[in-house]
Amino acid sequence: MTSATHRATRAPWLYLAPALVVLGGLLVYPIYQLGLISFFQYTQAQVSGGEPTTFQGFGNYSALFSDPEFWQVLLATVLFAAACVVSTLAVGCALAVLLTRVRAVPRLALMLAALGAGATPAVTGSTVWLFLFDPDFGPVNRILGLGDHSWTYGRLSAFFLVLLEVVWCSFPFVMVTVYAGIRAVPAEVLEAAALDGASQWRIWRSVLAPMLRPILTVVTIQSVIWDFKVFTQIYVMTNGGGIAGQNLVLNVYAYQQAFASSQYSLGSAIGVVMLLILLAVTLGYLRLLHRQGEEL
Amino acid sequence: MNLLRRPWRLAAEASALLIALVVAFPLYWMVLSAFKPAGEIESTEPRPWTLAPSLDSFRRVFGQQDFGRYFVNSLVVACSVVIVSALIAFLAATAVTRFRFRFRTTLLIMFLVAQMVPVEALTIPLFFQMRDFGLLNTLGSLILPHIAFSLPFAIWMLRGFVKAVPEALEEAAYIDGASRARFLWQILFPLVLPGLVATSVFSFISAWNDFLFAKSFIISDTSQSTLPMALLVFYKPDEPDWGGVMAASTVMTIPVLVFFVLVQRRLVSGLGGAVKD
């Protein structure tokens, strides 16, 4: 970009103005408000204007951090997101490699099926998977011969069911992206590796994975973010967080505190914690990108 | 790619087809169950076909008060979000890819960071903000936040499409006497359109999908509700009306699938033809 017109200083800001106004008003300002509310006492009484809002300092945070339930939910969120990310990436990458090994018809079939899964709204995906695993009328228990075993009763099996739905609707993004990346690798490179007697696994590990690293980084981070923020699937499939809150993740926990118990300031404090965790992940990602020398 | 011997390729193709069936099965089951008569849905021996397809479940869904209206509401929300955010994102992506200016990198990093923000966590402040705007119980309270939330990702995705338009084209346009606005809307915009459409899939889905805001911001005026809420009417945890849930799910999923299929075509034809050096 060296031509004189591109050095104009006003034009880019003119183009950016609408985006900045919208983001400032509906993203940055709410984040500021979220932080603010987390430092005040803000319950139903304050919302309806009956009582004045009082400054709490870190009171909400110390209440939160001394609550064992919070730590339990945090741990569950991290483990659940990690399991979802690993499964999504494994399935997505494996199927991307498979796509390069087959002719047009099976490839199209798999692509279409995956696009269908990826396009399914989270609410409908959740209800459909619940129905598939329904103890009374679902086909899965019949096929597996599990009788009327309830998948949402146990803590782990409920998480597992949600994980299946999450992987089902998010692996297509990984598969399509990685597949496009593999197709961009010159065929000669792969043929040379094969001629040298490299196994499939070896080709993936020593040739493809390093060449695809930028793409893999992107899909990994994108998955981390999506899976850490899962809300709808948990909310619908475990009916608001499971029996006695056994399937709560941070997002649902914050929502329940705020809108079910009217503890708006506690909910906001949880929101701030989530924000900080994802910010840390993002900064780690940016450092990775930087080290790989990718230009923004 | 002829790296594999024949039996291996056949095995790979067979497993690809099998996996495609497994992946498509939930959607098949959803549509199938929507058409099953009540007796077959509530059967403890579910069969993967039906010999007596019935529209009862759909009748129940559309007979529910205002279901058609919820559908239109969802459509209005999703389309407004797609159009407005696409235009705003196009301008912003052009700014960050075709210009060099101070804070450009900072802005890009901000757009990236903005994608990480867990929007659900902002429900609380947004609720109060929408209340202050007087937008609670209106579709505006769903449209506005979704425009904001889909922007960072849309800008980030669009960069690649804008970058792919050769600079020579821009220079040629200016030499031919085109103004910057003319280049922007009559040359760049049509070239980026396939990318814009592809990107808008994500904003469409996030808006169409939205369950949390619909649940939190539309509290007393149900005429402003959207589809997810209408669907969950049939889903009572203790005694779900599975036929109704599956029929409503089918109705809710089809527009997204149609959108996806349309976009696929656009993507292929657009990228292949228009942008050539």
Image: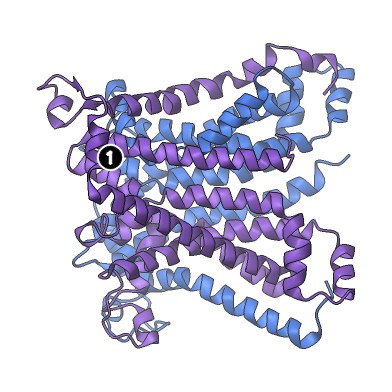
- Amino acid identity at mark 1: Ser
**Location of residue A88 with respect to B255 vertically, above or below:** below
Give above or below for A71 relative to A136.
Answer: above
Give how far across and how far down residue B46 sits, in percent: 34, 83
The quarter of the displayed image where residue B129 is located: top left
Q: Position of residue B265 (x, y in %)?
A: 68, 53
* Number of marks: 1
Q: In the rendered image, which quarter contains the C terminus of chain B?
A: top right
Chain depicted in blue = B
Report if residue B146 is visible in the image. yes
Query: For this rendering, which residue is in front, A90 or A57?
Result: A57
Which residue is more in the foreground, B161 or A57? A57
Q: Is residue B217 visible?
A: no
What is the x, y in percent for residue A35?
A: 34, 27
| Residue at x 79% of width, y 63% of height | A207
Q: Which residue is painted at 41% across and 74% down in the image? A: B32
Task: Kindly indicate the quadrant of the structure image that contains residue A34.
Answer: top left
x then y, percent, for residue A217? 64, 50
- What hue represents chain A? purple
Check disc 1 and report the residue beneath it.
B216
Chain of the residue under label 1: B
Within 10 angstroms of label 1, few (less than 14), some, or many (20 or more) residues?
A: some
